[in-house]
Image (cartoon, rainbow, N blue to C red):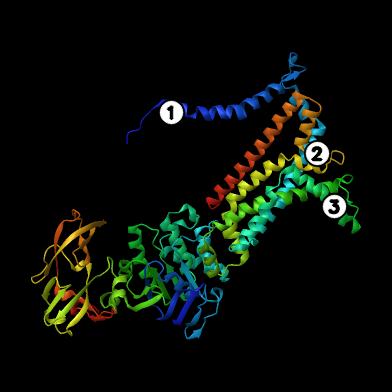
Amino acid sequence: MSLNLESIDRVIGGETHIADMNLTLEPGSFNVLLGRTLSGKTTLMRLMAGLDTPTRGRVLMNGQDVTGRSVRHRNVSMVYQQFINYPSLTVYENIASPLKLAKAGRAEIDRRVRSIAEMLHIEHLLDRQPLELSGGQQQRTAMGRALVKDADVVLFDEPLVNLDYKLREEFREELRAVFSERNCIAVYATTEPAEALALGGNTAVLHQGRLLQYGPTAEVYHRPNDIRAAEMFSEPPINIVKGTLSGSEISFDNTLHFPAGNELGTLEPGEYRFGIRASHISLAPRAKGDIEIHMTVDLAEISGSETFLHVHNEHFYMTVHLEGVHEFRVDAPVKLYFPAHKIYAFDHEGAVIHIPTHLRGV
Amino acid sequence: MNKVYNNRAWWLILPMLLLVAFSAVIPLMTVVNYSVQDVFDAHTRFFTGTEWFKEMLNDPALQAAVLRQFAFSLTILAIEVPLGIGIALIMPKKGWQASAALILVTMPLLIPWNVVGSIWQIFTRGDIGLMGWSLRELGYGYNITANPVDAWATIILMDVWHWTSLIALLCYSGLRSIPDAYYQAARIDRASKWAVFRYIQLPKLTNVLVIGVLLRFMHSFMIYAEPFVLTGGGPGNSTTFLSQSLTTMAIGQQDLGPSAAFSLIYFLIILLVTWVFYTAIMNMQKDNNKGA
């Protein structure tokens, strides 16, 4: 079962929510839709499900045009950010509900409900009602409902947002395991680059209703097509600094000059926008030849056991991703280091010109 | 954290205590006071104990009024609850239509009780009333002053017209609070409209319905102005409900002792039924939650 979206537009009240979307999802693939809020992830999923019809373009399932076919006549299932279950039914009845509606036999229903429940580790909760369960258990029930009926397309709309950190990690692993044994198309929407990387599979990067890039997750991460795709697929976003390449020297806004190295040195001389990943910048040189840069601290944002350090000089801003908890005084000067051979280069329109060789990944 | 114990805080509830005393406890105690005495005038009174209560409980006219009252309350609940849910389900969900429907549905609730009675009194008149005249022209000898069935039907119709909106509005708000994702999920499951109602909407409406039914029960059990204006309790005593009997006794006949005893019985009936109903519903929900 493959799913093709051909030049899809979705316009609601004069506002374009999805523009010129072309996407082919292969049978048995796990696909992540990555994008910020309002990037069109949910809209796209609704189109894939058949809950909405596109304003223009075609949706094909296995080569067959299903554009106007309503969700009732497609074999899809969906898991939402909220925990959606029938409140008055037990977990067992909830998971059984799609099968009952499909008029499956009782023995068949029982077998499948129990095997799904076991897979999701809720077999001991089958007699309970959803509202008596914890959030994670409720979401497992909802997933059970989605997975029990062997849908062609299973859609997850940010299903883990309302769960705590530990549970999310657990869920992600299980989810991948579940889908590795199935031949359906899984689509998973998330706002978090880290989640996309953890899930693997393929990633489609969305921005303002447009598809920026689609491909195997690691490849999209390592080899962004352009600045926006790189920014969307990194947290904190990749640092972009305007600079000039002249011969063998790069200068950032005419203030910082450093040798371009053998890779960047081969590019045409001219104006570029250089990209440095926040995690490639450090407080101490990691290798000989790391470039030293003097900045001023704006803010140190501590997130878990990591620190996002926001700094500036008179020309540009940067964000640094540091391991561990670091404290900084605001306006304190700070010396930072980054390796020249890990710099991306983009042209003035944002298209990627150079990807560091050893970051090219797969 | 250190908790500060300061018993002067009790003074803060004093205003509330005084308010409740003046608005509820003192008037109620006055009634209790009357109910155990036979009062002749400002200086002559006898203690009667439970005599008035016994008399009231054995009074056939009052027993009939109690039965009538229950019949009335149960009938209007049986009509208004399903009808209110139905209206809430078909009310438009957005746009100007939703506002228009809300205003239209709210309208009857804004009309004072005795005005409702007057409206229906005119409405049902055989000579100039739209309904009364039409029914007669159609060949049905409609007459609320002579035919108890007509009188009952009209009072029930009037109450349904006046109060179904309350149930409808409560349900409407309950329905609006169901996230759209539930309906989507149901569509994806290919659930029928009935299944959506039975397994999504109705469970989500239980809480508002409990409130709605309780309000409507208490309200209708105390109904006074509307039937009083419309039928005056007639024909005969066929539409004389409890509060009208009480008023006649207390104001018309100045039987303060019996009517005080009767008031207390009346109050206890409402309290008891409400409590039984509430407890029953809550237990039902608990049982459901146990997955029985």
Residue drawn at (65%, 36%) of the image = B271
Q: Identify the subunit bearing mark 1.
A: B
Q: Is residue A7 visible?
A: yes
* B12 or B159: nearer the viewer: B12
Determine whether, in the image, residue B65 is placed left or right of residue A227: right
Q: Could you give the CA–CA distance between mark 2 and mark 1, rounded to whole angstroms?
A: 50 Å
Whether labels 3 and 2 belong to a single chain: the reply is yes
- First in sequence, mark 1 or 3: give its number: 1
Viewer-nearest of labels 2 and 1? Answer: 1
Q: Position of residue B259 (x, y in %)?
A: 75, 27
Q: Position of residue B150 (x, y in %)?
A: 85, 49
Q: Secondary structure at mark 1?
A: helix
Q: Secondary structure at mark 2?
A: loop
Q: Identify the subunit bearing mark 2.
A: B
* A347 or A341: nearer the viewer: A347
The residue under label 1 is which amino acid type?
A: Ala
Viewer-nearest of labels 1 and 3? Answer: 3
Q: Residues within 10 Å of mark 2 (few under 14, many from 20)?
A: many
Q: Could you give the CA–CA distance between mark 3 and mark 2, rounded to whole angstroms?
A: 23 Å
Residue drawn at (28%, 69%) of the image = A234
The residue under label 3 is which amino acid type?
A: Gly
Determine whether, in the image, residue A292 is placed left or right of residue B249: left
Would you name the residue on which mark 3 appears?
B129
Would you name the residue on which mark 2 appears?
B240
Quarter occupied by the N terminus of chain B: top left
Quadrant in which residue A307 is drawn: bottom left
Q: Is residue A305 visible?
A: no
Q: Which mark is residue B9?
A: 1
